[in-house]
Image (spheres, grey):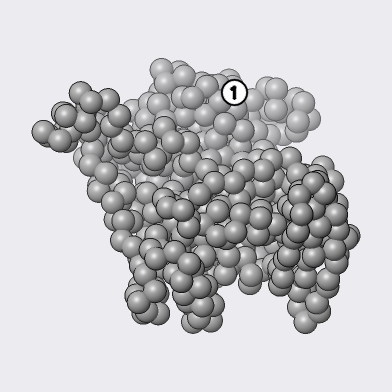
Amino acid sequence: MERVYIFDTTLRDGEQSPGASMDAASKLQMALQLERLGVDVIEAGFPIASQQEYESVKRIAETVKKCKVAALARALEKDIERAASALEKAVSPVLHTFIASSPIHMEHKLRMSPEQVLDAAGNAVRLAKKRIPRVEFSAEDATRSEWDFLVRLTRVAIEAGADVINLPDTVGYTTPDEIREMFRYVIAGVSDLLQDRDVIFSTHNHNDLGLAVANALAAVNGGARQIECTVNGIGERAGNTSLEEVVMAMKIRNDVYPYYTEIHTREIVPSSAMLSKLTGLTVPYNKPIVGRNAFAHESGIHQHGVIANARTYEIMTSESVGRNRSELVLGKHSGRAGLSKRCAELGYVLTEAEVDKLYERFIALADKKKEVYDDDLHLLILGVQQGATNVYELEQLSTSGHDPSMALVKLRRGDQLFCDSAVGDGPVHAACMAIERITQISGRLEEFEIRANTPGKEAMGEAHVVVRIGDRDYRGTGASTDIIEASVLAYLNAINKYLVLSESQNGNAKNGH
Ligand code: KIV
Ligand code: ZN
């Protein structure tokens, strides 16, 4: 059986999902979970995008040891230098440089002739190769490019030293038959260069027509041996190839796809849950493998069959993807050690100070609700980690009355305390107005969702908001057993994200496409 390498781009392309932005601490947390999941490459980000992004890639590169860490750069000297600098301390760095190859992108976006694109690609790969031993080259919008031009471009990149050639379906346009043939054609066109070189072909697919997983598998049949994908399939527009789906498709239908990966499949559901909490992007109930209903059987006939023999209606066990692992419940007698152990099992790496803070909040929660579930823990941890990066922290909230309501809000910024009050249509509105008076940031609430994260009357309320500030949306998450407080925390989290970003931005555009 041949190996297919898994290149995870959750933290780069995935983070380009509208509203999926994560702060540096969350990205590091997720990177460590991806390491446990066993991906081969973690694409940590696009360092030229902002100072914050650069720092975050650098931190991941310094911390992650078991996987390769990649950073993205356009085929420009300043991008490549920045990416190389962020990767300096990585054990196994990959510099990923790209330029568009389709007529429409060359003419309208790059305003470059095909010859200029060939030159730029060769120069970029040569420069990248001088700085970092392993280089991936991507021909952006490959699936809408002329195949003969792709062959020429691939030859240039390989001759310049590229170790990986990626032919992305940037706009999610291709079909399985077409992409398989494209890979066959390009690989055949450069076969003479592959005699004495170890070059891997990679596939990177977007899901605009819902074909990303099928296209990735077809590309593998055409000769690709690396799949670029994201946890929960998050990514630009309709998302990328979903890691869990493509990995499990190769595992379950190994008769059709005789390839293996080194993914520890029991880490799939924990990875999905962590990402969903960190980004606030919920997983659809019917999402294959990781959706809440993926192993639920509603009809009597199915239930009867599953009780008699699970394989009647299940093609894989829920344990094999790590679902039932998270049933363990903690209570207030579990102790600090038990709590810390459970967090580690869930993939979190916490400092002693964070565990102390978490323990305090855990005991407070366990006092209110007897059983603390993994979903509660995810939220408590998120709250502690948000506290480390938040500009403003909620110190006190009191509300009274309904329509109009009155709210009194006390916020902490470093050593300073700020207090203000406001009137609004309801308690959440009033509190948001008070926050606006203190922070002087006016945001428009675009989306607001609140749900119970675990069963039971005392469940924590998990609030998700999208707040528009200027021309950008900021996603915020908050959790509390009091739903008004959860909502206000979520709003404040979005404001904090805006502040962190605007304070660190160096004016560069954040987009790899
Ligand atoms: O979709 C795409 O083409 C990309 C490249 C930058 C690899 O994300
Ligand atoms: Zn992409």
10 Å crowding of disc 1: few (<14), some (14-19), many (20+): many
Which quadrant: the C terminus? top right
Residue type highlighted by circle 1: Ser
Towards the viewer: 157 or 399 = 399
- Residue 242, horizontal then vertical, whole percent: 44, 38
Residue 468 image-quadrant placement? top right
Residue 123 visible = no
Residue 208 sits above or below residue 294 on the image: above
For mark 1, what is the residue? 145
From the top left corner, tell me how far across and down residue 485 is, in percent: 65, 59
- In the rendering, at what x and y percent does residue 278 appear? 55, 55
Out of 27 and 163, give the one closest to the viewer.
27
- Can you tell me whether the CB of the residue at mark 1 lies under 8 Å from the nearest atom of ligand 1? no
- Name which residue lies at 33% across and 63% down: 329
Residue 508 at what x, y percent from top left?
A: 78, 52
Secondary structure under the numbered disc 1 in the rendered image: loop
Residue sitting at x 62%, y 43%: 449
Give the camera-side residue of 270 and 248: 270
167 w.r.t. 326: above or below: above
Which residue is farthest front?
A: 401
- Residue shown at 41% from the left, 32% from the top: 286
Left or right position of 423 against 59: right
